[in-house]
Amino acid sequence: MRIKFSLALLISLSLSFTVSSYAATPSVIMNGDAHVGEQAVLSVETSQIPSNGSVEWSVTPTTGKNPSRISLRAGGRECAFTPLDTEPIRVIASFIDRNGEVVSSTETLVTPKEFQIDIAVVIDRPLTLWDSSRRANYALSPDVLMAGSPVRLRASLNPQFRGEHTFRWNGDASVALMSQDRDDIFMRRGSVGDCEITVTAFNASGVRLGSGESRVSITLPVSTYEESSMEREAWQSWQRAQELWEEKSYSEAVTLAQRAVNLSPRDTEISDGLRAMSANYARYTKAQKLREDAAAFDAARRFDDALKNLRIAQVIWPLENGAEGIKAAEQKVDQMRKLIQEANWLRDTASAYDNENMYEDALDYYARSIAIVSSDAVSDRMERIRNRLTLIADADRYASEGNSLEREGKLQEALNRYGASIMSNPDATLRQHVEELQSVISRRERQANNLNREGDDLMKRNQNQEALRRFTESMNVWPTDRARQRLQQLSRVKLAPGTVIRGPEDFGIGTRIDAQKIIQEADELYASGNIDEAAALYRKAQAIAPSEEMRKWVARIDAVLKERDAVNAANRQIAEANALFRAGKTKEALDLYRESLKTHRNAEVEAFIQRQGASR
C-alpha cells in the first residue's frame, strides 16, 4: 500500500512499535516497540529528504490484516497506523526529488506485539486470626486468601496503554466471578485450592490488545476463620460477662458467659469460669428466692417464717444490710408472740360461745382474734357460723309463716313452711310438731270421709237435714270435693234451728294451736268461776293435744269438782239430818250424819256425833 504525501492525513496516535530496517540509508526512525491496537508512528529525518523533494510511504501487511487508520503527519515526514494483529507489516519510505524521481528508498519490517497483562491480587487489609494462647489478634501474610470470601483482582497492561481499553475476565469452573469488563473485579472460591484466572484486553475498536493469566491460591478455609472469629468473640463476651458480674448484673453476666462457652466450647478457661459463675449465681438466686419469700411471709404476718428465710439467705449469699433485716424481723417475731397469745385467748372464748350455740358472741370474738392474727381456719369457721345464722333466720321465718298459716287453719300450707324450716335448720321439736300435724291431717281426712259416708247413707234414707249436717261437719273437719258436691245437691235443704255443727275438736282432732285456743277460752271461763264449762274445755284440749302438764291440770280440776260435788252432797245429807234431829228423831239423824261423813269428811259433824255419844 503506497501513501503519497499529498494525502496529508493528520491523525494523532501515540503508540510506538519495533522497526526492522533493511536499508542503511536513508533510515526510518521509530521509538519503542509496536503493539497491536496501538498507533505506531515511523519518521524520517528532514535532512534525508531531497531539496524540494518529498517522501512516499508504502504500508503493506505480509500475511495479516491491513493496519487501520493509516495517516501521514508532519508534512509527510511521519507515517502513522494501528496494527490489528501480530503479523509483520512491510513499511517502505521512498525519497522523491523535485522532478518526481525516486532518489532512494528504505524498507522496514514492523512486527507488532501483544501487550503483556499483569494480574495482581489487591489486599486492602490483611486477614487476622485469633491467638487463643496469647488472647490477641495476629495478622496473616498478604498472600493468604480465604475461601468463600471475595478476592479483589486487578489487571494492568504492560507497557501502559495510552488509549481507551476494556478487559474481559474468565475463570475455571471452581471460581465465581462477581463482575466483568473492569480493571478491578472480585472472585470467590468456596474451598481452598488453586484457581485459573485469565483476562483479555481490547481497545475501543475491539482490537485485542493481549491477554494474561494467573493462578490464585486460596489457602485459608472459611471454617478456620469462623472458628477464630468465634473464639475472639467468645473471649470478648467472657470479659464483658466478668465486668457485668462485678457490676452485680448477675443474670446478664451468666447469660453472656453461657454464650461465650457456646461460641468456644473448648476454651477451658471460659468453661471453668462459667461453672464457677453458675454455681455462685445458683447460690445468689436461691438467696434471692428466700428473701422474696421472706417479704411475702412478712406481708402475711408470718414473721417466724420470714425470719427463718432471712437467716438462711444471709448464710447462702450475705448482704451488707442483711443483719439489719434479720434484727428487724426478730423484733416483729417478739411482738407477734404477744399478739398471738391475745388472739388465742379471743379464739378460745369464741369457741366456747360457739359450742354453746351463742353464735353472735362467737362471731364477735372470732373477728377480734383474726384482726390480730389472721387464720384461715378461723375465717372458715366464721363463714360457717354466718351461713348457720342465715339458715337459722330462714328457718325461723319459715316456722313463723307456718305458725301463722296453722292459726288460720291452712294446715297443708303450714306443713310446707315447716318442712322448709327443717331443711334450713333441723329442729327436733319442730320435726315432732310436723309429725303431729301430719297425723292430725290424716285423722281429719279419715274423719271427713267417715262423715261423708254417714251423709251418703242419710241421703239414701231421705234424712237430708242430718245429711246436710254431716257434710257441713265434713267440710269443717277437712274440705273435700265430695262434700262440696253434696252440699251443692242439698243447697235447698235448711238445718233445723239450734242444730249444733261439730268441728274437728269435737272429734278430738286438732292441732296444738287449736288446743291453745280452747285452753285460752277455758282459762277465761275458769277465771269467771265457770269451772264446769272450763273443765269441759280443758278436757277437750287434752284430747286434742295431750300433754303431761294439761293432764295434771285436768286431774286437779276434776279433783276440785269431785270434792265440790262431795261437799254439796254431804251438805244435803247434813241438812236432812238436821231436820230429823230437830224432829226428835235422833237415831235417824245420827245415822244420816254418819252417812254424810262417808260422802265428805266434816270435822264439825264428827265432833257433834262424838258429843251425842258421850251424852248417852
Image (spheres, helix red, strand yellow):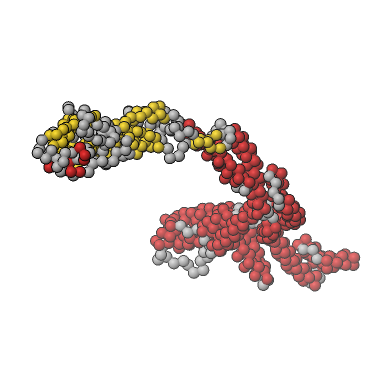
Q: In the image, is residue 607 above or below residue 287?
A: below
Please state if 200 lies on the left or on the right of 302 as rendered.
Answer: left
Please state if 400 lies on the left or on the right of 4 as rendered.
Answer: right
Q: Nearer the viewer, residue 312 or 591?
A: 312
Please state if 423 lies on the left or on the right of 141 as rendered.
Answer: right
The percent coordinates of residue 342 (x first, y second) are 75, 57
The percent coordinates of residue 410 (x first, y second) are 52, 61
Q: Nearer the viewer, residue 441 or 193?
A: 193
Quarter-of-image position of residue 258: top right
The percent coordinates of residue 473 (x first, y second) are 50, 61
Q: Residue furthest front?
A: 51
Q: Quadrant of the C terminus?
A: bottom right
Q: Residue at x 46, y 54 (%)?
A: 453
Quarter-of-image position of residue 363: bottom right
The percent coordinates of residue 565 (x first, y second) are 71, 65
Quarter-of-image position of residue 214: top left
Q: Residue at x 42, y 32 (%)?
A: 147
Number of numbered discs: 0
Q: Nearer the viewer, residue 542 or 395?
A: 395
Residue 278 visible in image: yes
Residue 429 visible in image: no
Q: Nearer the viewer, residue 33 or 448?
A: 33
Q: Quadrant of the N terminus?
A: top left
Q: Residue at x 57, y 53 (%)?
A: 423
Q: Residue at x 62, y 40 (%)?
A: 277
